[in-house]
């Protein structure tokens, strides 16, 4: 990416992320949730068979220790349950939504759909499809970069030209 694109891309992504976080913070408290819970409930809503904590962490791109800490609170509040039954969750057990959790997830989905419709109005469907394909490709490539030493190699190479 050229520098101008890097600045624009980084600024836009950071701005969108910040706005999403502000929206979550503003409205999740009204639902008695933390903003970190929102996407997890949304994910569990779309997977009636449930997800393990590790699967939830991976799907939501959340830190596993955060998921572990916060799931106990959701279990205690009766928002999620273990699919296997029993009081406490065990490693690998699937988590599903309770009736209360389903109602909250339905509200989250309605709000998410309204936000999506609002921000994408007047953008042709073909452009949105192209945008999401491109964004998915970029996300995959950024994730791939986190798994390599490519950036360090560039830093090392460029550092040699400065010295």
Image: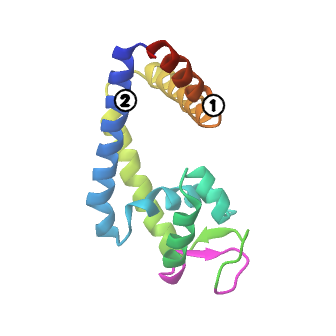
Q: Residue at x 34, y 15 (%)?
A: 4
**Please, what secondary structure does the residue beneath circle 1 have?**
loop
Whole-percent x, y for residue 106 in the image: 45, 61
Q: Main secondary structure of the magenta part?
A: loop
Q: Residue at x 54, y 77 (%)?
A: 72
Q: Is residue 123 visible to us here?
A: no
**Total numbered circles:** 2
Q: Is residue 22 left or right of residue 90?
A: left
Magenta segment? 75-87
Q: Is residue 122 left or right of residue 100?
A: left
In this view, the residue in front, 148 or 155, is 155
Q: Which mark is first along the chain, 2 or 1?
A: 2
Number of the front mark, 1 or 2: 1
**Please, what secondary structure does the residue beneath circle 2 have?**
helix
CA distance separating discs 1 and 2: 21 Å
Q: Is residue 89 left or right of residue 151?
A: right
Q: Residue furthest front?
A: 163
Q: Residue 149 shows which numbered tag?
A: 1
Density class for disc 1 (Cα within 10 Å; few <14, some 14-19, many ≥20) is few
Density class for disc 2 (Cα within 10 Å; few <14, some 14-19, many ≥20) is few
Question: Can you identify the residue that label 2 sits on?
Answer: 10
Q: Is residue 87 visible to us here?
A: yes
Whole-percent x, y for residue 151 in the image: 55, 27
Q: Is residue 91 left or right of residue 153?
A: right
In this view, the residue in front, 1 or 116, is 1
Instruction: State yes or no: residue 76 in magenta.
Output: yes
Q: Residue at x 45, y 25 (%)?
A: 128
As drawn, 9 above or below 52: above
In this view, the residue in front, 98 or 147, is 147
In this view, the residue in front, 72 or 115, is 72
């Amino acid at each position: 990416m050229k520098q101008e694109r890097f600045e624009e891309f980084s600024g836009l992504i950071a701005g969108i992320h910040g706005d999403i976080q502000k929206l979550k913070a503003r409205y999740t408290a009204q639902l008695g949730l933390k903003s970190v819970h929102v996407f997890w409930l949304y994910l569990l809503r779309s997977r009636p068979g449930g997800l393990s904590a590790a699967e939830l962490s991976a799907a939501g791109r959340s830190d596993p220790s955060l998921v572990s800490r916060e799931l106990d609170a959701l279990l205690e509040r009766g928002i999620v349950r273990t699919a296997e039954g029993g009081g406490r969750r065990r490693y690998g057990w699937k988590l599903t939504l309770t009736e209360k959790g389903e109602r909250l997830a339905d509200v989250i989905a309605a709000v998410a759909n309204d936000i999506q419709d609002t921000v994408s109005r007047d953008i042709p469907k073909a452009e949105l499809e192209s945008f999401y394909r491109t964004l998915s490709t970029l996300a995959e490539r950024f994730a791939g970069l986190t798994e390599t030493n490519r950036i360090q190699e560039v830093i090392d190479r460029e550092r040699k030209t400065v010295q």
